Amino acid sequence: MKPGASELAAETGCRDDLKHHRCTREDAMKIETLPDADGVASRAAVFIAAQARSAARLRGRFTLAVSGGRTPWQMLRLLASEDVPWPGVHLFQVDERVAPAGDAERNLAHIRETLLANAPLAAAQGHAMAVEATDFHAAARQCEQTLRDVAVASPQVPGARFMPCLSLIIDNCKQ
């Protein structure tokens, strides 16, 4: 049985049909305080893995957007060893420096080193920013199309508006 919009929202945070969903206390943000960066990385990896399992069960896929910076490196390394339904995962890079391929300053180099080298994620499921493109407008259009193809909200919900919906976004938090 496919879940309805309210169940999807509660499980994945993705609201397919906003006019029929009412926020509840269960939808509210939960704030945790952890002792150090390693604790945060560990807790985040466990949280992401749980979200991935839930989204894969409910929607058949989990779409994760990862920003750059040093903060997510340890978390991504730990995530690679978690119980994640990798065949249903799509990773979107949402922050990158304009630098040559392989440059140590590129966020993609760190995503490859920490997660992609350690997790069974197929190359077609990793969506890097096209900072090496000569036509950035064409690259942006391709990125938009990829989001539409991969991250569209569940079409099983009658009346749902079809718009990209990422399961989880990890932003760059400064220490």
Image: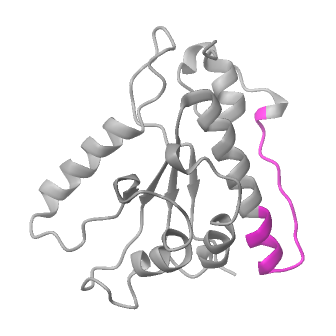
Residue 141 lies left or right of residue 56; in this view the side is left
Q: Quadrant of the N terminus?
A: top right
Q: Residue at the location (69% across, 70% down)? A: 78
Residue 146 visible (yes or no): yes
Q: Residue at the location (54% across, 32% down)? A: 60
Scheme of colours in the image: one colour
Q: Residue at the location (68% across, 66% down)? A: 81
Q: Residue at the location (21% across, 50% down)? A: 142
Residue 43 lies left or right of residue 14; in this view the side is right
Q: Report x, y in % for residue 136.
A: 16, 63
Residue 13 visible (yes or no): no
Residue closest to the far top: 158
**Along the viewing direction, whichever of 5 and 114 lies nearer the viewer:** 114
Find residue 55 and report its image quarter.
Answer: top right
**Along the viewing direction, whichever of 46 and 120 lies nearer the viewer:** 120
Whether residue 35 appears in magenta in the rendering, the answer is yes
- Is 53 above or below relative to 37? above
- Is 152 above or below relative to 101? above
Whether residue 91 appears in magenta in the rendering, the answer is no
Q: Report x, y in % for residue 112.
A: 45, 75
Find residue 99 and report its image quarter.
Answer: bottom left
The range drawn in magenta is 27-43
- Is 47 above or below relative to 76? above
Q: Quadrant of the C terminus?
A: bottom right
- Is 104 above or below relative to 24? below
